[in-house]
Image: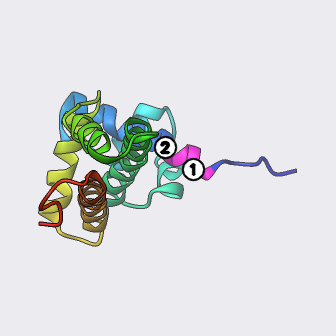
Amino acid sequence: MPQMVDEQERRQEIARATLEITEAQGANAVTIRAVAKALGRSTAFVTNYVPSRAQLMFNALDYARGLWTEERTQATQGVAGVERLVELARWICQTNEHDRALRSLWIEVLAGSGPEIKVVTDITDHTFDEFQQSARGSGLRKAEE
């Protein structure tokens, strides 16, 4: 009987390895072979889930987007108005353990300007939308501007 595989967990495992490589050696060191080595797996294992170097970076950024969405939700849960806006601002000013690596990957993706750039625009657009919604809900004058 075939073994059940959690594809999302595999992609997250690959994303974490990609971030570790980026943190240790920079974005230029991210390759399918390097990720496979970090995981103790074959390159075929990696390409089964993430088929290209560009997709490795996209996958890591997408993984971070999920983490950021959870963190943002936790930071603003149960608060409204000006308090929500303040908590959102506090959250966005925080850093996490992967920030440096993610910035490097972000720049690499932007430099490539391929279809993977959508994850970058999605992250920034969604965060901006959250600020706008929080500003509108704050009751502050000129929040719409």
Magenta segment's dominant SS is: helix
CB within 8 Å, label 1 to label 2: yes
* Residue 141 percent coordinates (x, y): 14, 58
Which of the 4 quarters of the picture holds residue 143?
A: bottom left
Residue at image position (31%, 47%) is: 81
Picture colour scheme: rainbow
**The one of 46 and 124 positioned closer to us in this rendering:** 124
* Residue 42 percent coordinates (x, y): 50, 43
Q: Which residues are magenta?
A: 7-12
Q: CA distance from mark 1 to mark 2?
A: 6 Å
Q: Amino acid at mark 2?
A: Gln
**The one of 75 and 2 positioned closer to us in this rendering:** 75
| Image height of 114 relative to 44, above or below | below
* Residue 77 percent coordinates (x, y): 45, 40
The answer to whether any part of residue 28 appears in the image is: no
Which of the 4 quarters of the picture holds residue 96?
A: top left
Q: Secondary structure at mark 1?
A: helix
Q: Residues within 10 Å of mark 2 (few under 14, many from 20)?
A: some
Residue at image position (43%, 43%) is: 73
> Which residue corresponds to mark 2?
12
**The one of 95 and 140 positioned closer to us in this rendering:** 140
